[in-house]
Image: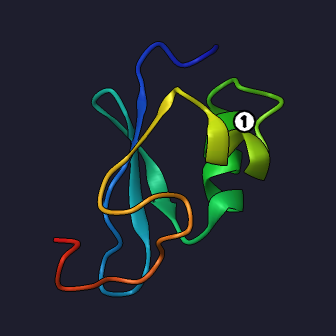
Amino acid sequence: MALAHPVVIYPPAADGGRRVRAGDHFLGMAYGLLDIAEFLREAGIEDADETYVESSALIEWRGGGPRAWEAGPDRR
């Protein structure tokens, strides 16, 4: 089943993990692009990989883009 809602990647937490949600469903805590790709594959996007995660219009990045994995004072 493909995702019907945009995927939101939240700002990095203190440990560098980022919450990943699709609509009102929590997909998991990601610690890198591969984690997000795996969540998307499990949700039905079989061809998801790091490149897809970085460039997909389905994904909304909050508190930094795909290269932001460290918490900072401006990323609350």
Q: Quadrant of the N terminus?
A: top right
Horizontal and vertical percent position of residue 52: 72, 39
**Local secondary structure at mark 1:** helix
- The residue positioned 83% from the left and 31% from the top of the image is 47
Horizontal and vertical percent position of residue 64: 38, 62
Q: Is residue 53 above or below residue 71?
A: above
Horizontal and vertical percent position of residue 46: 80, 28
Q: Quadrant of residue 3?
A: top right
Q: Quadrant of residue 56?
A: top right
Q: Amino acid at mark 1?
A: Arg
Horizontal and vertical percent position of residue 16: 43, 81
Left or right placement of residue 52 versus residue 69 in this view: right
What residue is disc 1 on? 41
Q: Nearer the viewer, residue 38 or 63?
A: 63
Left or right placement of residue 66 versus residue 37 in this view: left
Q: Nearer the viewer, residue 13 or 60?
A: 60
- The residue positioned 60% from the left and 51% from the top of the image is 36
